[in-house]
Amino acid sequence: MKHSEAGIVSYGVYVPRYRITPAEIGQVWGVDGAAMGQGLNIERKSVPAPDEDTVTISTEALRVALARGRIDPQEIGALYVGSESHPYAVKPTATIVAHAVGATPSLTAADFEFACKAGTAAIQTCLGLVRSEMIRYGVAIGTDTSQGAPGDALEYSASAGGGALVIGRENVLATVNHTVSYTTDTPDFWRREGQRYPSHGGRFTGEPAYFRHVSECAKLMFKEAGTTTKDYAHAVFHQPNGKFPRRIGTQLGFTDDQLKYGMVTPRIGNTYSAAALIGLANVLDHAKAGERILVVGYGSGAGSDAFDLTVTDAVAGYDRSVGLPVQHYLDSGVELSYSVYAKYRGKIHMGEA
Amino acid sequence: MREVAILGTGMTKFGELWDRSFREIGIEAGFQSLVDSKLSSHDLGALYLGNMASGAFLEQEHIAPLILDYAGLAGHHLPAIRVEAGGASGALALHEGYLAVASGAYDFVAVGGAEKMTDVSDTEASRIVDATADTEWELVFGATLPSLWAMVARKHMHEYGTHREDLAALPAHDHLMASKNPLAHFRNKVSVDQVVNSGMVADPLGLLDCAPLSDGAAAVVLGPMETARKYTDTPIRIAASQVACDTMALHHRRDLTTLDSTVFAAKRAFSQARRKPADIQVAEIDDAYSIAGLVALEDLGFVAKGEGGAAMRDGRFFGKGTTLINASGGLKAQGRPFGAVGVAQVVELVRQLRGEAKERQVSGAQVGLAHNVGGTGATSAVTILERAN
Amino acid sequence: MAIARFWRETPRRYNLGGSRCTVCASVYFPPRTVCPTCSTHRQSIGKMEPLQLSGEGEVVSYTLVHEAAVGFEMQVPYVLALVKTTEGPLLTGQVVNVLPDEMRVGLKVRATFRKLREEGPAGVIHYGYKFAPRDDLEPGPRPGRNAEATPVHSSDASRARA
């Protein structure tokens, strides 16, 4: 079903300032980290400060989005935060973020969890509420401060960042033409209740998981929208590393030019629930009116959500002077040693006080 | 209002008194002060006790009757009153005792100050004393007492060109004086270089810029001047006792490098005593942090605003000029048992004015001033004492 | 710190809700019930209105803290500053996203949202403002407008008026 009226009316991104390189991580574990980084196409990953978490990152990203769109937070009817690293197991991230942006109390709020695609699931939920005119604005946030167990392959990629999208019907920057999903029960990556670090199925996370779901979901979208790769100026895929999205993009027939703005993981690492949103934000930073964008998220467990968007004329008048462009986060950063990184990420076992 | 005299003094050693309890030190100082005069405990009309945080340090509140009881005075059924004003608790207890005698409400009162700080961990003790700043709007954001004073120091350096070494001069002087004081917490000498290079606490303040956490108690007994010579050969007159307050948080002050509480307490005290700074031969100033001592010289009127750094650099108050500061070793080296500080300062002045300060005696001292601060300056007390000739 | 004690201050800690005296126009943070500036304090009672600070300001003084306050040990050394806001009030807060040698008096900063403290691994997490250098290219978002803003003890105020 085609709904041209609803879409993204504003967006904001926040990535913590600190970075660490695979080489620095590898030297601790006796691994050639630089080679590992090249294999994964990850040059560095972001690291949150000890006083940053999913709540603070979400708040920073959303404050930017609201200021750019000049949106009255009291007009937000729904706010969802997708993450696999909510600071509380029970107690919503969304309520704290809602209060911190001044959106309380007249709204619905909840936390979403679906590994790396909780953020895109939140977009779909907001679209439903906005299209049905139950709410004026819905906020979909994808944020993570992901952890890989020390020495695990994930440690080379798991990073931190957040993206916030405001979904509405007025002054839409990018209309959501279609959205489809592809969902199965595939245990490729998980974290059991009470466990500190996630576990994964190694190479099982590849073909039967990421590649199958992203590829099938993209094909569902081509069918639904009646499109081919040539219809899209830009394509954004979930990016657990810099290698997977390039491979799936090429397999589907996209060129490097179509993929370039959507690829952010090589410079900031895998921001999990935020990855597709930050990729999309970078595309929107550069997009021109009339361009069409394909976004395919992926969450382990497993599922993919795809979006077909068209950039509107409103993009020309959009105030990007507030907040920082995604490119800033790709270029800047302060590099940490592994020891400081370990301290910041709570990997050092402290004595009881 | 009648004139009030100090008739006797008592003080325990300051320091880490591992084998001594709060009750023991409180009583020791109190009895010394009585024995130092010819007063009997039956003469006392009331007890005022300066203490900052017995509840937090010892899980014991209601300590004024506790000390009274263990001093054997429970049967006298005296009123015993605890006074709290952060680091200025001792000076405020003295102020209350002074007013009680001056007003005629009581003839003789005992004023004590006591703090037992080492029965909790250093970390816990720091947390407790930090609470003399604004918990909700300073401490919540990671502030500590030394970090707040460090920002006063930075501002003073920025405004007046004060040097790091100027700050370090006072702790070095304090340690030199304390080396002559058997009751002092620290009796080692330290150089300006050692202070400058001491481990950083909150830039620019190092460990040796900060007074220690100490155990200790001090006491005085007060009575009306007119009958004072019946109880002591050398009564010391309280020529002025003044207290002034200001905003709780440093960030609300009129000027970040001025303690208006000190300015006002000093102005009122000099006026009450009909004295001026140049009349003071011995001054005990609150140097819980080196910068606090430096701005105190300015705020008390010993030097103009901004000249504290130069005064410290030149050692103008370290024995060369008309006034010598911190003959006891100050808070930095004599020690800082919070609630005892204000009373201990007065004990030192009395000993100086009586000519009993031995090795550290300032010759011919006739007029002395004590200056005690709570928090970052929400409370200041200034007391002026004179030898009654 | 007990939960309610922190929770009741969230409009201030999250969103910088202050107050303004409608008699003399002085601005306060945290909000006050009585204006200390008005020569007759009574005239300000009931006339203090909520005013949210923009979060923009500049550093008046600062320190690099090495001996941390309890709960801040993992951030050592951290920068603490006195920040003069554009509306007038001075605030105490940490400055983040800055290297110690980048700190200076006069540095332009804006409020950011961070974790202040955790009540141990099982307790509540407290959030609130800190400051970050303000890139001149980045006007920066403002704290969330707060509908609940600043209760200025309206019941007391109405009693005082009556």
Image (spheres, coloured by chain):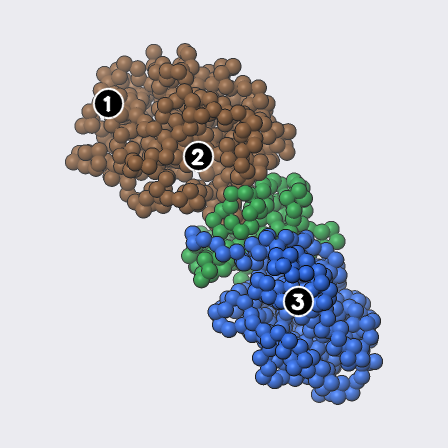
Numbered label tally: 3
Q: Position of residue B281 (x, y in %)?
A: 45, 16
Q: Along the horizontal axis of the image, is A318 left or right of B156?
A: right
Report, in whole angstroms, how far the alpha carbon at label 3 lies from the one at label 1: 76 Å
Determine the residue positioned at 57% across, 58% down: A345
Q: Amino acid at mark 2?
A: Pro
Q: Is any part of residue B193 visible from this angle?
A: yes
Disc 2: host chain: B
In the picture, the disc for residue A270 is 3
Same-chain check, marks 3 and 1: no
| Chain B color in figure | brown
Comparing B14 with A69, the one in front is B14
Quarter residue A328 falls in: bottom right
Using the image, determine if residue A269 lies above or below residue C68: below
Report, in whole angstroms, how far the alpha carbon at label 2 lies from the one at label 3: 49 Å
Q: Secondary structure at mark 3?
A: loop
Report, in whole angstroms, how far the alpha carbon at label 2 lies from the one at label 1: 30 Å
Instruction: Name the front one of labels 2 and 1.
Output: 2
Comparing B275 with B134, the one in front is B134
Find disc 1 in the rendering and name its residue: B35
Using a 10 Å C-alpha cutoff, classify the residue at mark 3 as few (fewer than 14 neighbours), some (14 to 19) or many (20 or more): many
Q: Which chain is blue?
A: A
Disc 1: host chain: B
Determine the residue positioned at 49% across, 16% down: B319
Disc 3: host chain: A
Q: Amino acid at mark 1?
A: Val
Q: Position of residue B27 (x, y in %)?
A: 26, 32
In the picture, the disc for residue B212 is 2
Q: Secondary structure at mark 2?
A: loop
Determine the residue positioned at 63% across, 59% down: A30
Q: Which chain is green?
A: C
Quarter residue B65 falls in: top left
